[in-house]
Image (cartoon, rainbow, N blue to C red):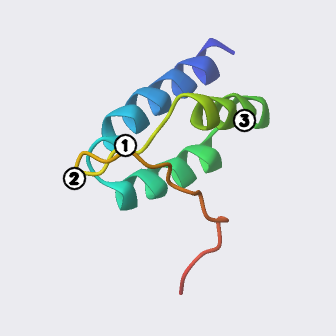
Amino acid sequence: MPMRTDMLAYYMQVLEKISRADARIFRKELRKAFRHLAPSDRNLLKEWYRTACVCRPRTGTMQQVPVASSTKRK
């Protein structure tokens, strides 16, 4: 179980750094995190995203980025 928690912490750290740089990559990495995490960790990540994570574009304005459903493009 420690490995799962470590992966959750890893994804949170990566997403926090990306959220300040690029919204498109942030959404891509968030979807990837959801695919790789266990269901219980996904719930923790969702809660973190909803309460703590704000995507910050380069313009300096703050806005939340909606997470699209995980449909695959062809």
The residue to which callout 2 is attached is 59
Q: Position of residue 25 (x, y in %)?
A: 36, 56
The residue positioned farthest toward the front in the image shown = 61
Residue at 37 percent of width and 56 percent of height: 23
**Mark 3 crowdedness (10 Å alpha carbons): few <14, some 14-19, many ≥20:** some
Residue type, numbered disc 2: Thr
Viewer-side residue, 62 vs 52 = 62
Please tell me whether mark 1 sits on a helix, a strand or a loop: helix
Mark 1 or mark 3, whichever is nearer to me: 1
**Mark 1 crowdedness (10 Å alpha carbons): few <14, some 14-19, many ≥20:** many
Whether tag 1 and tag 3 are in contact, CB under 8 A, the answer is: no
The residue to which callout 1 is attached is 19
Image: 64 above or below 46: below
Q: Position of residue 34 (x, y in %)?
A: 63, 46
Mark 3 or mark 2, whichever is nearer to me: 2
Residue at 55 percent of width and 81 percent of height: 73
Residue at 59 percent of width and 57 percent of height: 67
Cα separation, mark 1 vs mark 2, equals 13 Å
Residue type, numbered disc 3: Ala
